[in-house]
Amino acid sequence: SQVRKAYKRKSLPAPWVHKLQEIDFNFKINNLDAKWHHNFHILRRYKYTTGSLDLPANYTDPNDPKLVECARWLQRQHALYRKQKLQPIRVKMLRNLGLKLRR
């Protein structure tokens, strides 16, 4: 996020830093977590535009490589869930979006 970049460059105003620290804002984020959230938001956008979460694993569209990556990501989330390795907060987020996760 822009806030994290500004914090890293030490250009974020001190009052902002203080307020964000008060709410336990995480200034550093793991790249894997960031990628997960990125794909989640792509999936959310897909649902908003199509009204569906039916994104096939073999989805291809040369004009939208992010959606192709998201389709593969979604299949990995199902596999992780079946193996009981998907973090509970992520299960909750996906279910709240309307995704049916099955074991």
Image (cartoon, rainbow, N blue to C red):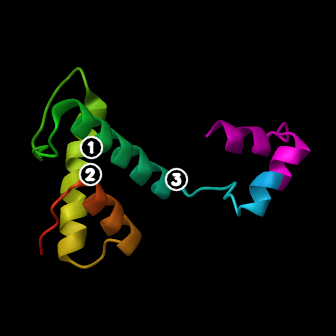
Q: Are marks 1 and 3 in contact (CB under 8 Å)?
A: no
Decide which of tag 2 and tag 3 comes sooner along the chain: 3
Mark 2 vs mark 3, CA separation in Å: 15 Å
What are the residue bounds of the magenta stretch? 1-18
N-terminal-most mark, 1 or 3: 3
Image marks 1 and 2: residues in contact by CB distance under 8 Å? yes
Q: Which residue in the protein does label 3 denote?
A: 31
The total number of labels drawn is: 3
Which residue corresponds to the image point at 13% horizontal and 32% vertical from the top-left?
60
Q: Residue furthest right?
A: 14
Badge 2 marks a residue whose secondary structure is helix
Query: Quick one: quadrant of the C terminus?
Result: bottom left
Q: CA distance from mark 1 to mark 2?
A: 5 Å
Identify the amino acid type marked 2: Trp
Amino acid type indicated by mark 1? Cys
Give the amino acid type for the residue marked by disc 3 in the picture: Asn
The N terminus is located in which quarter?
top right
Q: Nearer the viewer, mark 1 or mark 3?
A: 1
**Residue 73's mark?**
2
Horizontal relation, residue 35 to residue 12: left or right: left
- Give the left or right position of residue 47, taking residue 21 as reference: left
On the image, the x and y values in percent for residue 70 come to 27, 43
